[in-house]
Amino acid sequence: MVRKHYRFHGRVQGVGFRYKAMYLARGLGLTGWVENQWDGTVEMEVQGKPETIERLLSRLQEDRYISIAQIEESDRPLEKERSFQVKG
């Protein structure tokens, strides 16, 4: 199990990114959160198996409305949580 923090740049607000991420993450059994930021980016923390997180990222990039130009990634400590939530 790992926990990752991501910041997504590109056409990621106003295109259903947060709810798509939540739907996919819950379906994959991942936990965490996703939130729009004031600068037009989207931040997400996600926890689970590394290969499952990669599957989530791949599926987000396949969406025809979402256009991810850049992803910043960092590691975070594991947290006790039960679901994936949309913040804000």
Image (cartoon, rainbow, N blue to C red):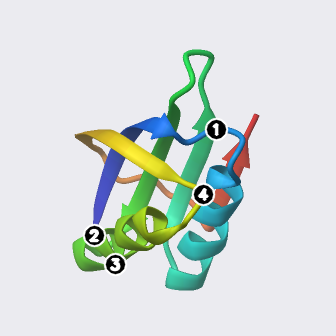
Count of labels shown? Answer: 4
Compared with residue 47, is residue 5 higher up or lower down, i.e. above or below? Answer: above
Residue 12, by quadrant, is: top right
- On the image, the x and y values in percent for residue 4 come to 32, 50
State the CA–CA distance, disc 4 to disc 1.
Answer: 10 Å
Please say if the residues under marks 4 and 1 sit with CB atoms less than 8 Å apart. Answer: no
The type of residue carrying mark 1 is Gln
Under tag 4, what secondary structure? loop
Q: Which residue is mark 3?
A: 52
Q: Using the image, determine if residue 37 lies above or below residue 74.
A: above
Q: Secondary structure at mark 1?
A: loop
Question: Splitting the image into 4 quarters, where does residue 76 fall?
Answer: top left
Which residue is under mark 4? 65
Q: Earlier in the sequence, mark 4 or mark 2?
A: 2
User: In 3D space, how far apart are the residues under numbered discs 3 and 1 (Cα atoms)?
Assistant: 24 Å
Residue holding disc 2: 1
Q: Amino acid at mark 3?
A: Thr
* Residue underneath mark 1: 13
- The amino acid type found where label 4 is placed reads Tyr
Circle 2 crowding by C-alpha within 10 Å: few under 14, some 14–19, many from 20:
few
- Tell me the kind of residue under disc 2: Met
Q: Give the percent coordinates (x, y) of residue 64.
A: 55, 65
